[in-house]
Amino acid sequence: MANDAEKEQAARASLKYVRDGQIVGLGTGSTATIAIRLLGERVRAGLKIRGIPTSVASRDLAMQLGIPLITFEEAQEIDVTIDGADEFDPGLNLIKGGGGAMLREKIVAFATKQVVIVTDSSKQVPVLGRFPVPVEVIGFAEPLLAKRISELGAKVVRRLDSSGKPYITDENHHILDCHFGQISDPAALACTLSEMPGLVEHGLFVGMTSVVVMAKAGEVVEFRRG
């Protein structure tokens, strides 16, 4: 498929930002998985890095590939993170969390000097909101938060797993997928959501991206913040 080819092309291009001796944040999702596999090839060829994964799935994959891993106990600053996104706008604001890992992804991005987002061309939008904003919540607060977020104008849907049960994140929380439509002010919405007690994290990443590496029609295009 065209998108799969674009994902691999963008992931491969993003590896130029990874250098020997660095601490690397390992993202989550289909495009990040490709990047991790490519990093594994580089490690087997002699690249020396240490990774901090953003999910159990990424941790397990990195371990299978022989990528050395550390935690924030060993280091509190990450040189570069390679991750994907569900959407990005002209200001390089993102919606993330389709893979359910936005809490750890945002923590890793917060600790990172250079956040490199890898996407195919379908993720570029003029205004965020085509993709729902995932919101990670504690189970106790879920009904309350669903009501309060719906009062902001969103259609709120509880995320389910493949068996039809509530989706459980790596931190044992639930996810509400919140369909806001076009989000004219991502920063304002991010602040509103962050102020709600019981809401652990949301999928709006505002002002955190250093560069987006996007593949489109056989070419790689880069977008930089600022």
Image: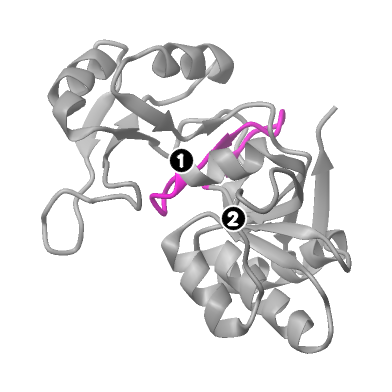
* Helix, strand or loop at mark 1: helix
Q: Position of residue 69 (x, y in %)?
A: 62, 67
Question: Is residue 217 shown to the viewer in this render?
Answer: no
67 to 135, vertically: above or below: below
Q: Position of residue 47 (x, y in %)?
A: 83, 78
The residue located at (41%, 54%) in the rendering is: 99
In the picture, residue 87 is in which quadrant? Answer: top right
In the picture, residue 94 is in which quadrant? Answer: top right
* Helix, strand or loop at mark 2: loop
The residue located at (24%, 13%) in the rendering is: 148
Please state which of residues 86 and 138 is positioned toward the viewer in this rendering.
138
Q: Earlier in the sequence, mark 2 or mark 1?
A: 2
Mark 2–mark 1 Cα distance, whole angstroms, equals 15 Å
Q: Position of residue 210 (x, y in %)?
A: 78, 39
Q: Which residues are magenta?
A: 86-102
Residue position marked by numbered label 1 in the rendering: 103
12 to 115, vertically: above or below: below
Residue position marked by numbered label 2 in the rendering: 71
Please state which of residues 166 and 76 is positioned toward the viewer in this rendering.
76
Please state which amino acid type lies under the numbered disc 1.
Leu
135 to 113, vertically: above or below: above
Q: Position of residue 163 (x, y in %)?
A: 12, 63
Q: Is residue 163 left or right of residue 51?
A: left
In the picture, residue 1 is in which quadrant? Answer: bottom right
Please state which of residues 145 and 198 is positioned toward the viewer in this rendering.
198
- Mark 2 vs mark 1, foreground winner is 2
Q: Is residue 93 magenta?
A: yes
The residue located at (66%, 69%) in the rendering is: 35
